[in-house]
Image (cartoon, rainbow, N blue to C red):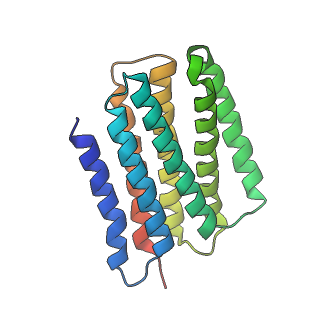
Amino acid sequence: MVILKPLSTLLVITVALLSLLRPVHSPTYTVGVTVGLVLSLGGDIALLFEEHRKAFAVGLGLFLLAHATYAVVFTLLGRVSPWDVLSIAVLLGVGAGFYVLIRSNLGRMTAPVIIYMLVISAMVSRAAATLVSFTFSAAQVAMILAGALLFYLSDGLLAANRFWKPWRYRRIGLAPYYAGQFLIALAASYFVP
């Protein structure tokens, strides 16, 4: 697992960078997503040592920056619309419900986890905003939104395992994580003239 996690993320980074070889591509999207993926790679490496509080905090910080990077990219290439209010309300409701579930076990991680939840929710909201963007094709919108939601699910599973109820099959959260990252990276190759 120690080599497979970072290697898997390196493969996803390669998927994003291959879009630069296509005749029609968006350097803004590819570079932005690649920066997010490199930050995620750092988070993956830090979380290999998640039993250490400091390593977990570093991983959390790097993933927070990755989500913020994705949110900026989706915002730069997307649009702001009245629908943003709905996505934000839904995500805040889900986040508040999840917080109630895990809050008793957060301790000193309360503020960092709340900030993280807000940033990942902003990323998913900005991914949803691609629905009304003229920049992205329908295929890209589907990939970006599904990717963001899978990443959100994966982080929820990780947080539930750490702060609510640890379970034996916690590695199952890696499936939506890598599927989400892959879809966000793959969307870089679907720009049309």
Q: Give the residue at the far front of this rendering.
A: 54
Q: Is residue 79 above or below residue 169?
A: below
Q: Is residue 193 above or below residue 105?
A: below
From the viewer's perspective, tell me whether residue 78 is left or right of residue 187: right
Q: Residue at x 45, y 61 (%)?
A: 33
From the viewer's perspective, tell me whether residue 12 is left or right of residue 68: left
Q: Residue at x 63, y 32 (%)?
A: 114
Q: Nearer the viewer, residue 180 or 8?
A: 8
Q: Nearer the viewer, residue 128 or 39?
A: 39
Counting from the top left corner in percent of width and height, residue 166 is at: 42, 17
Q: Is residue 165 above or below residue 19?
A: above
Count of marks, rendered view: 0
The image quadrant that residue 78 belongs to is: bottom right
Q: Nearer the viewer, residue 136 or 26?
A: 26
Counting from the top left corner in percent of width and height, residue 165 is at: 47, 16
From the viewer's perspective, tell me whether residue 76 is left or right of residue 81: left
Quadrant housing the N terminus: top left
Counting from the top left corner in percent of width and height, residue 37 is at: 40, 54
Q: Residue at x 50, y 71 (%)?
A: 28
Does any portion of residue 139 appear in the rendered image?
no
Does any portion of residue 27 appear in the rendered image?
yes
Counting from the top left corner in percent of width and height, residue 58 is at: 44, 35
